[in-house]
Structure formats: structure tokens, C-alpha cells
Image (spheres, helix red, strand yellow):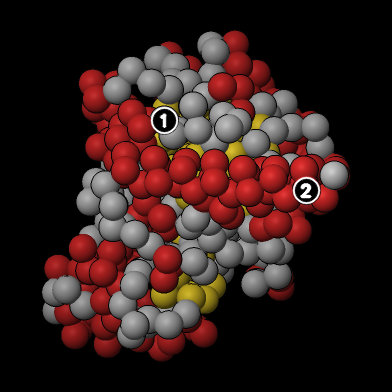
């Protein structure tokens, strides 16, 4: 069985960095200890908050792990559109008896990127990945100089080429099936829902376009899928929704239960909760507000933060952001370490079956 790129972990299994609390230190460390590559999500945290979680992981495991950063958002955001959406959400605020964020949220678009990068250069971690864009050549070179392996999330051949040109060590190829936010480098409302293609097709396209190792992400829930992605040219697979259901995951229990609840039958891309396309289980909030949500990330994320917290506190799945990939019904609430072992066994069995089939065909 192959390992992750650059020998980062014994198994070619990467736990996705899920911002918002799911990818907590306990989950990341458990995945690492079992032979996968665990990740912390740096997004939506302060620089110090990120550093405290890094220290927690180091206390729990000596194996390699990763940290993910959100790239600063530089696109124009229309304040009037954000205010109009605030009005759209007035009924929700009244229902949950809270006030929507009143502070100036228009300028909050860099997620503390510079401060977080400075910490990762001063006290390096084994792997750093990036979402929502590609860092400058100098930043990637600086990380390489301190021994950090860098990964850029891409959703197209064009983005993969940009990552290679900038000096990334690998790309995380995200297919349309992926839960949570699309990692597109540009947020263009004109191409909503079409920015990414299916994972297998995208892996094959990127494999022929760039020479970088590929981590494949999007709807992966079983070891046989990992085997298919490795056969298509990936070096490893990244799983998010599969680990979301684990007891170590920091996801809300209501969110975990919803993954396999027959009430939630499908996923869709929506801007309703954050202002950027993200895949989640279709619920009331998404249906009622998705059509009116502006392209305003992360401003809408901050605007709806109180609503999402209030819905979670009330146990109301219909008002929460239930991020999930297309394979969510296959979620297994196993301990993270056990899930890694099960996935590895499924992968080995699938690869053995494929090898036997090839040998029979050749004879």
C-alpha cells in the first residue's frame, strides 16, 4: 500500500481540515496516531488560537500533521448587498431572539493570514495547506526553507498550474462532490455550481497538466474509492465528511446525526450561510435564504454566525450550516483511529482485487 505524498503518513489517508470546530486537536492527533495525516483548520481562529491548537496536537502525537490557512479575500463586496441580506434575515433573528452582527464586517476579509503565516514560519509544522487561493512564491519558498511541505487546494487545471508555478509541493484537487466550501481561487457568481467537475475526471486532468503530487478530495467515504483515485493518478485521498461523524470530531451532535438522517436526502451548493458556495445538507435555512444570499465572503459568514450558534444551541438542524459531501449517507460514527484502519483495510482489499483481475487478464 502506498503512503501519503513525501512519506508524510503510513497510509494515503488525509483528514480534511474542516473549519468551524470539527477538525479539533483530538481528531487530528487520533488520525495521525492511526497512520493517516491529521489536519487542523486555521480558518476562523485567531493566530494565537491556531497556535494553541498546534501545541495541543504536539502534546498528543509525535507524528506529522498539517495546518490549513484561508487565503485573504480581495474581491469587492457590495455593502448594500450585505445590508439587504441582513434585512432578509431579520425574521430569523427574531425567531431565535438574537441580534445580527452590527460591527463593521466589510473589512474582515484576511482571517489573520499574515499573523498565522508568521507563526508557522517561526515555529514550523510538517505540512501547511491553503484554501481560497494560492500564496505568493515568496511565502511558499519561506515555508520550504523551514522544512514545511506545502499544499494548495485547487478546483481546476488552471489553478493547479498556478500552484505549480508558485512553487507548491503538492495540490489538493477538490471535486464537485466535496462538502463545505469550494476552494476556488476566485469567487465568481457567474460560474456558481460549475467551478468544479467530478473528482475522478478532475484528477485525471490535473495529473496530465502538472507534475505535482495530488491529494484527491470530494465525496470520498470508502477505501475502494481511495483505490480508484490512486489508480487515476492521486497519491492520497482527503476525507472530510467521513471523519465528521467520528466521536473525536468537534462537530455539533445535531450535525453528526443529520449526516445519516433520512430527513436530509440531498446536498446542494449554497451561499446562504457564508456568502461563498459551499455544499451542505438541504434544510429550511438553505431553501429560504439561499436564493437571496450575495457573493460576500466572509462578511455573510460573520453576519449569520449568531444565527447558526443559536440554531445549534436549540438543537435546530433546520437553521444550521450542515456541511456535507455527496457521500454523507455513507458516514460511519467510528472512532477516528478505527476509521483509518477500516479505510486502510478496504483500500488494501480493493487494490488486491484489482491486481488479481489484472493478472487474470494478462494470463
Using the numbered discs, state the Cα–Cα distance from disc 2 to disc 1 in whole angstroms: 32 Å
Residue situated in front as seen by the camera: 76 or 302: 302
Identify the residue shown where x is 49% and y is 66%: 327
Q: Position of residue 193 (x, y in %)?
A: 65, 72
Can residue 127 be seen by looking at this rendering?
A: yes
Placement of 20 over or under 257, stated as above or below: above
Picture layout, residue 138 above or below residue 114: above
Residue 80 image point, x, y percent: 49, 74
Q: Secondary structure at mark 1?
A: loop
Q: In the image, is residue 187 above or below residue 24?
A: below
Q: Which residue is mark 1?
A: 35
Whether residue 77 is visible to the viewer of this picture, yes or no, is no
Where is mark 2, residue-wise? 360
Of 16 and 117, the residue lying toward us: 16
Q: Residue at x 71, y 63 (%)?
A: 197
> Quarter-wise, where is residue 255 in the image?
bottom left
Closest to the camera, between mark 2 and mark 1, is 2
Left or right of residue 142, residue 267 in this image: left
Write the residue at 44% across / 52% down. Answer: 240
State whether residue 246 is above or below residue 291: above
Residue 22's x, y, as percent? 31, 50
Q: Residues within 10 Å of mark 2 (few under 14, many from 20)?
A: few
For the C terminus, the image quarter is: top right
Would you call the spot at circle 1 few (<14 residues within 10 Å), some (14-19), or many (20 or more)? many
State which quarter of the image contains the N terminus: top right
Amino acid at each position: 500500500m502506498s503512503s501519503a505524498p513525501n512519506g508524510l503518513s503510513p497510509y494515503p489517508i488525509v483528514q480534511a481540515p474542516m473549519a468551524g470546530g470539527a477538525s479539533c486537536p483530538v481528531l487530528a492527533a487520533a488520525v495521525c496516531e492511526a497512520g493517516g495525516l491529521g489536519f487542523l483548520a486555521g480558518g476562523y481562529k485567531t493566530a494565537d488560537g491556531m497556535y494553541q491548537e498546534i501545541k495541543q496536537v504536539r502534546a498528543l502525537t509525535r507524528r506529522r500533521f498539517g495546518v490549513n490557512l484561508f487565503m485573504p479575500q480581495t474581491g469587492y463586496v457590495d455593502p448594500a448587498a450585505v445590508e439587504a441580506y441582513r434585512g432578509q434575515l431579520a425574521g430569523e433573528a427574531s425567531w431565535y431572539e438574537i441580534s445580527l452582527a452590527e460591527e463593521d464586517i466589510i473589512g474582515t476579509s484576511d482571517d489573520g493570514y499574515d499573523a498565522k503565516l508568521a507563526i508557522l514560519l517561526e515555529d514550523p509544522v510538517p505540512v501547511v495547506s491553503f484554501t481560497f487561493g494560492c500564496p505568493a512564491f515568496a511565502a511558499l519558498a519561506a515555508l520550504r526553507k523551514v522544512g514545511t511541505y506545502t499544499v494548495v487546494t485547487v478546483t481546476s487545471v488552471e489553478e493547479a498550474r498556478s500552484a505549480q508555478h508558485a512553487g507548491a509541493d503538492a495540490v489538493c484537487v477538490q471535486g464537485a462532490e466535496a462538502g463545505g466550501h469550494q476552494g476556488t481561487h476566485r469567487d465568481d457568481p457567474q460560474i456558481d455550481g460549475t467551478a468544479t467537475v467530478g473528482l475522478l475526471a478532475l484528477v485525471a486532468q490535473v495529473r496530465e497538466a502538472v507534475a505535482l503530487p495530488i491529494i484527491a478530495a470530494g465525496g470520498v467515504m470508502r477505501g475502494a474509492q481511495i483505490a480508484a483515485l490512486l489508480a487515476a493518478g492521486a497519491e492520497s485521498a482527503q476525507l472530510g465528511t467521513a471523519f465528521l461523524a467520528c466521536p473525536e470530531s468537534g462537530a455539533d451532535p445535531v450535525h453528526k446525526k443529520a449526516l445519516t438522517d433520512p430527513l436530509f436526502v440531498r446536498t446542494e451548493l449554497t451561499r446562504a450561510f457564508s456568502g461563498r458556495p459551499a455544499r451542505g445538507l438541504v434544510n429550511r435555512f438553505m431553501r429560504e435564504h439561499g436564493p437571496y444570499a450575495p457573493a460576500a465572503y466572509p462578511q455573510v459568514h460573520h453576519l449569520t454566525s449568531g444565527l447558526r450558534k443559536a440554531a445549534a444551541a436549540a438543537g435546530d438542524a433546520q437553521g444550521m450550516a450542515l456541511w456535507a459531501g455527496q457521500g454523507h449517507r455513507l458516514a460511519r460514527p467510528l472512532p477516528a483511529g478505527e476509521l483509518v484502519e477500516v479505510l486502510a483495510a478496504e483500500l488494501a482489499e480493493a487494490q488486491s482485487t484489482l491486481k488479481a483481475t489484472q493478472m487474470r487478464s494478462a494470463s
